[in-house]
Image (tube, coloured by chain):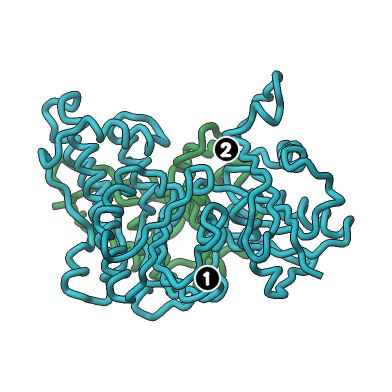
Amino acid sequence: MPIDRILGIETSCDETSAAVIHLDGRRPVLDSLIILSQDVHRIFGGVVPELAGREHLRTIGPVVDRALAEAQIGLGAIEGIAVTAGPGLVGALLVGLMYGKTLAFQLGLPLIGVHHLEGHLFAPTLELPDLEPPFVALLVSGGHTLLLDVAAWGQYQLLGRTRDDAAGEAFDKVASLLGLGYPGGAALERLAKTGRPGRFRLPRPMLREVATGGPDRFAFSFSGLKTAVLRAVQSSADIERDRADLAREFQDAVVDVLTEKTTAAALELDRRTVVVCGGVACNQTLHDRLTERLAGIARLVVASPRLNTDNAAMIAAAGAWHLGQGDRSGLDLEAFDSGPLPGMLVSEAQN
Amino acid sequence: MTEPELRAWGESVGRSLSPGQVIWLEGDLGAGKTTLAQAILRGLGVADLVTSPTFGLVHSYRTRLGVAYHVDCYRLRTSLEARDLDWLTIAGPDVSALLIEWPDRAASFAPAPTLRIKLVHTASAEQRTMTAEGSVAVPAVPASH
């Protein structure tokens, strides 16, 4: 019997999220998505509780209930459960995992544990139902920066990843160095719009390897760039004057590296579609630069911001694909703090 | 210390460690805490890429002495949030090493260090000074330039 209506649950780190999707043929269609940090008023109405970070235990019930209510269905209509099993903070993952397992056991439903990063790859399928591999994927978030070749769903070749800080982490930490608070990635992007390009010159880490075609041509490193910003801040005679120009140059440096490596990967692998996903995919400058650079090379696919931040809809979409393949998790499914994508090939060069 | 000196010292520390160490890594953004953690874990025999745990909070690695945890408390907004970090596991009896960046942000949740390393920026670019103290014997810190 096909499993057509799926409840997704995501609690891998900071966010508590639940979503309902259904399948139209093989295409995932979003019925509802609740993301605690964005929808707290919709969930709790007039009396919003004081919430500290990662309070999944207090919020998972109301978040799932709200997702079901907005999909206008009851639990009885759910046919499968998809839940993030990792990577993430084990204590946070366990809350969603236990909730999902309990529902699956109580309702006698198939359960599938989903890798959080595979979820990000499936996010655009909720808006672009004809999206199919092969494509090159740039997965950029606060915790991860990877370039992947997706030959088929479930077949992922790691092209390169960050050696130190993730791109989103670099945005947030540089925002902090520039006095914009933490996390300030979005504030940094706003400030950069007002900055003058080229007044400062920061390194483009590991960009040269693209031209030389070395084994690190798709690898990233953002820690040194963060330190370079720190040095520029320390040696600035007037940080009020320089702040926006530094923000501009930092963002240009990150966007240059991400754009050039992604474009080089599409060309080298002859892929005509490029997917950008993860929280940093919300950066408009990155979007604009990639659109320009990929013209005539590949189609750029970026989901809307709500689907690029951590959310349960992408987990449901990835879970739906696995359930359709006949994959099932047992009730002994365990949370894991780290580990590669299922089906990911890593060559020696990436280590 | 230059970055190569920091890496070389960190690897020698990792090679010399006995199981059960709690290592605090202190210093401002960009001082070299994650670089040093990478070197110590490499010295402990970690073959995998060691990346910043700032977003994920806790990363685990297989070392020659068993599992090691690399923790970063930088983005905890209050020390109460440190409760989320499952200290019973990451500071458990079978853990080979627990490396903690920004331990002050976890307040009393962070176990006391057996080795406490402080990194401080210097005026000259690409340099930092380092102090290391604790109950565990470690290789001598290279003299400052």
The one nearer the camera, B64 or A83, is A83
Point out residue A77 in the picture as x, y percentages from the top left corner. 83, 52
| A196 left or right of A266 in image | left
Above or below A17: residue A293: below
Give x and y (percent) for residue B132: 35, 51
Residue, x 22% and y 30% (percent of image)? A194
Q: Which residue matches tag 1?
A: B62
Residue B108: mark? 2
On screen, residue A2 versus residue A294, left or right, reads: right
Q: Dot 2: what SS?
A: helix
Report the number of discs.
Answer: 2
Residue at position x 30%, y 68% in the image: A218
Which residue: 54% across, 72% down?
A153
Mark 1 Cα within 10 Å, few/some/many (few <14, many 20+)?
A: some
List x then y, in percent, for residue A224. 25, 53
Residues at circles 2 and 1 in contact by the CB criterion of under 8 Å? no
- In the picture, measured across the screen, residue A172 lies left or right of residue B68, that is left
Amino acid type assigned to the residue bearing label 2 in the image:
Ser
Q: How many neighbours does mark 2 have within 10 angstroms: few (below 14), some (14-19), or many (20 or more)?
A: few
User: Which three-letter amino acid code belongs to the residue tagged 1?
Assistant: Arg
Q: What shade does chain B have? A: green
Q: Please report, as a chain letter, where disc 2 is located.
A: B
In the image, which lettered chain appears cyan? A
- In which quadrant of the rendered view does residue A193 lie? top left
Q: Chain of mark 1?
A: B
| Residue A206 in the image, given as x and y percentages of width and height | 23, 63
Sooner in the amino-acid sequence: mark 2 or mark 1: 1
Of helix, strand and loop, which one carries label 1?
strand
Residue at 41% across, 44% down: A282
Can see residue A103? yes
Give the alpha-carbon distance from disc 2 to disc 1, as whole Å: 27 Å
Viewer can see residue B87: no
